[in-house]
Amino acid sequence: MYIIGISCFYHDSSICLFKDGELVFACEEERFTGKKHDSSFPHNGLRYILDTYNISLDEIEKFCFYETPTLKLGRIVKNYIRHPISSFSFTKQSLINWYKNTRTLRKEVGDNVYYQPHHHSHLYYSYYTSTFKDAVVVSVDGVGETDTATVAIVKDGKFTFKPLMKYPQSLGLFYSAMTSFLGFKPNNGEYKLMGLAGFGDPHLYYDKVSSLSMKHFVWDKSNEIMFNENLSKALGIPNRLPEEKILQVHKDIAAATQLVYEHNLFSLLDQVAKETDIRNLCLGGGCAYNGVANGKIKNITPFTELWIPPAPSDAGSSVGAVLGYLRHRNGFAHRVKETPFLGPEYSDEDIINQLPEVKLKKVSDSKLYEIVSQELQKGKVVGWLRGKSEFGARALGHRSILANPFIDGTRDKVNSIIKKREGFRPFAPMVRYDVQSEYFHEEDYVPYMNQVVNVKEEHQHLLKEVSNVDGTARIQSVTRTENPTIHKLLTKFSETSGNPPILLNTSFNVRGQTMVLTPRMAYDTFISTDIGVLVLNNFIIIK
Ligand SMILES: [Fe+2]
């Protein structure tokens, strides 16, 4: 029996497939279309599922949608009543979009749809990918239907939901609006703000940023902009335009924004912790990508255990929608297998067919690890595509660019020559889990790059190419069971070079593009950049 989950029309559209109660496929639509954060109905994902699993639409027991359109309509109308004049054209556009989207969904999948409240989708996805029995599950994002933050306390299999913050108040929209004020694209450049924050003094603008209110923001009145001129007046500078130089003042405002976000998040978590003695925390919602804040949760809040799934934003909600349906149907749902590798994979035959003009050389597994380790040792940058693509925003070793972090200048080389992105943006290390605590102040398993932790003082110089300016790093723990090929590569690299089993890992794409999905996309990126080695399954191409 097949069930399909869908999340779309806002950002990070995705689709997933459950077969006999088990999650077997999940992928963002952007990976197929190449359009970053694609929000359109996942036509390509649906076609891929029907073709690959050889099923027809009438074999689908249920389509599950990640939010409830009628609740969303209620929010649009309520918002209009609050500001009938200033939000007139915003409301008109919101109603047109709402109508178009509900009609598209009905046209594509018919009436056999289970609709679930937005934050419940986040919460179910986060909880059912964890290993906790009892847990506090918190979702924080821009906006669902009406809530912008929600908690579920899960005890003995029972979920008790409670809204924590309601629209237009929103931690996620605040962060996105400040992202936009600093010249980056909202719903896309938030991680740039987070990276920039490391270079600023958070205290210089803290008072100003923490006292901002809806007087300075217009996300409830406009589709085009998120802030008004009051924000410039309050901060004493004009908003930065995208191509303008980044000044120290922008870094200081970014730092203050990050600190204000953290204080608000921690205060929400403290408030929730007072209501229960459960100390296991699951996070969901787009804000759960804020690794800097996440890395401090166990030190600052009462929670002692933390779980964040690989795709906490709306992409993961396609999975959460199905989990909610299964609970609705059966009274319970099973845990989802803990893996981010849920997308398309390509056979050797696919690779040969996609690259007819390329003379491909296939090597054995052991030879592959040996050659790649030697090339990394020489300073070559490696494009690596093997296995099923990652679900979630992070490349975790199936669609990755890998480099040797023990060579000076590696970060600049990958940033400027290959990724072609801003120089201030740091790279992250993948580390074999058994040695992680020798180099980082973190003993727990952090497989999805969603926590920034401290590098041990004595290793900060050694790991400077994969650390942030403040001596922290967004680690990826690698184990043999979850990520066997990368585990083998780290081991071989360490044996060959004498360095620790740590590599620089970043997503396989250049600036402005989505992570590559197919061997064709990977090869085209390889050819157009200074990536020196390309690995496609066991085929290896060296420039
Ligand atoms: Fe969301």
Image (cartoon, grey):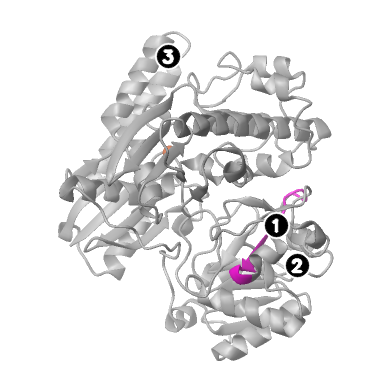
Quick check: 261 left or right of 32? right
The kind of residue tagged 2 is Pro
The residue to which callout 2 is attached is: 405
The kind of residue tagged 1 is Phe
Mark pair 1, 2: CA separation: 10 Å
Mark linked to residue 354: none
Residue appearing at x 70%, y 57% in the figure:
427
Query: Which residue is most to the top?
Result: 85
Q: Residues within 10 Å of mark 3 (few under 14, many from 20)?
A: some
Mark linked to residue 427: 1
Residue appearing at x 42%, y 64% in the figure:
343
Q: Residues within 10 Å of mark 1 (few under 14, many from 20)?
A: many
Residues marked 1 and 2 touching at CB (< 8 Å): yes
Q: Earlier in the sequence, mark 1 or mark 3?
A: 3
The residue to which callout 3 is attached is: 88
- Which numbered mark, 1 or 3, is in the foreground of this view? 1
Residue appearing at x 70%, y 84% in the figure:
495
